[in-house]
Image: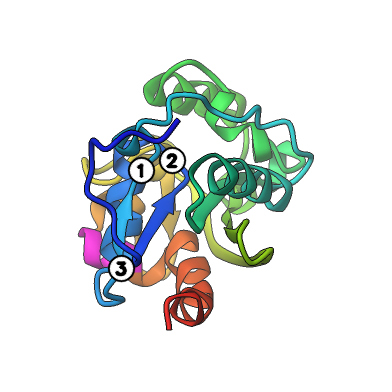
């Protein structure tokens, strides 16, 4: 049930995550759109969907559908993760469940990559952004990617998740060494959300 804990307007867009880091990134990317961004927890939704989709697209859609139906609001949800060529695409859709915490996930990844040479460490971040409005049966999905490689050790203190070991070859920095503005300009999530922005604008026009 939706509570009155956060003031809602007819320009409220629910973001289908309670991950504070991700919610801040999405809010920053949408700050020029004149929408009120809220998370499920802020409006009193405590339950979460089971993310059992086979692809990033599947998981993004199931989250957006779940939260839009639960709230009666349009919902933007994303599912994202890391694909490493030398690991046959792992961790993929299991990126957030590869280990219990970010440091443990990074360590597992580095352990699996310890014998992989520098020229075979190609990887990419993938983000599927789904916009669902259950009232109008609107469903839009956009995909964004960012190519890079896995560093041999973590570097940088910005970002979250695998950012400290995801290196952008053209600048020689990891995602965690970039400023938030630099990251948003290049990231998989930034690209997916910029693609979905015209659809958000149409919903609130």
* Residue stretch rendered in magenta on the structure: 179-184
Check if residue 187 falls in the magenta segment. Answer: no
**What residue did someone put label 1 on?**
39
**What residue did someone put label 2 on?**
17
Foreground disc of the pair 2, 1: 1
* Quadrant location of the C terminus in the rendered image: bottom left
Above or below, 5 relative to 25: above
Foreground disc of the pair 2, 3: 3
Residue at 30% across / 42% down in the picture? 21
Dot 2: few (<14), some (14–19), or many (≥20) neighbours within 10 Å?
many
SS type, badge 1 = loop
SS type, badge 2 = loop
* Quadrant location of the N terminus in the rendered image: top left
> 31 or 127, which lies in front?
31
Which is more N-terminal, label 3 or label 2?
2
Q: Are marks 1 and 3 in contact (CB under 8 Å)?
A: no
Where does the image place residue 26, in percent across and percent down from the top left?
A: 35, 57
Q: CA distance from mark 1 to mark 3?
A: 13 Å
SS type, badge 3 = loop
**What residue did someone put label 3 on?**
35
């Amino acid at each position: 049930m939706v509570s009155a804990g956060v003031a809602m307007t007819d320009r409220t867009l629910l973001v289908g995550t309670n991950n504070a880091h991700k919610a801040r990134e999405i809010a920053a990317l949408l700050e020029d759109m004149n929408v009120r961004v809220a998370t499920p927890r802020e409006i009193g939704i405590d339950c979460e969907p089971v993310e059992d989709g086979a692809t990033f697209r599947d998981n993004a859609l199931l989250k957006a559908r779940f939260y839009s139906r639960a709230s009666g609001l349009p919902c933007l949800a994303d599912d994202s993760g890391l694909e490493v060529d030398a690991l046959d695409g792992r961790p993929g859709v299991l990126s957030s469940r590869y280990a219990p915490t970010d440091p443990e996930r990074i360590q597992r990844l580095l352990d699996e990559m310890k014998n992989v040479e520098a020229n075979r460490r190609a990887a990419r971040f993938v983000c599927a952004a789904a916009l669902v409005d259950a009232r109008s049966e609107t469903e839009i999905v956009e995909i964004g990617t960012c190519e890079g490689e896995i560093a041999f050790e973590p570097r940088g203190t910005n970002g979250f998740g695998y950012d400290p070991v995801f290196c952008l070859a053209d600048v020689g920095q990891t995602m965690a060494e970039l400023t938030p503005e630099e990251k948003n300009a290049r990231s998989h999530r930034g690209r997916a959300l910029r693609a979905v922005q015209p659809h958000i604008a149409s919903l609130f026009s």
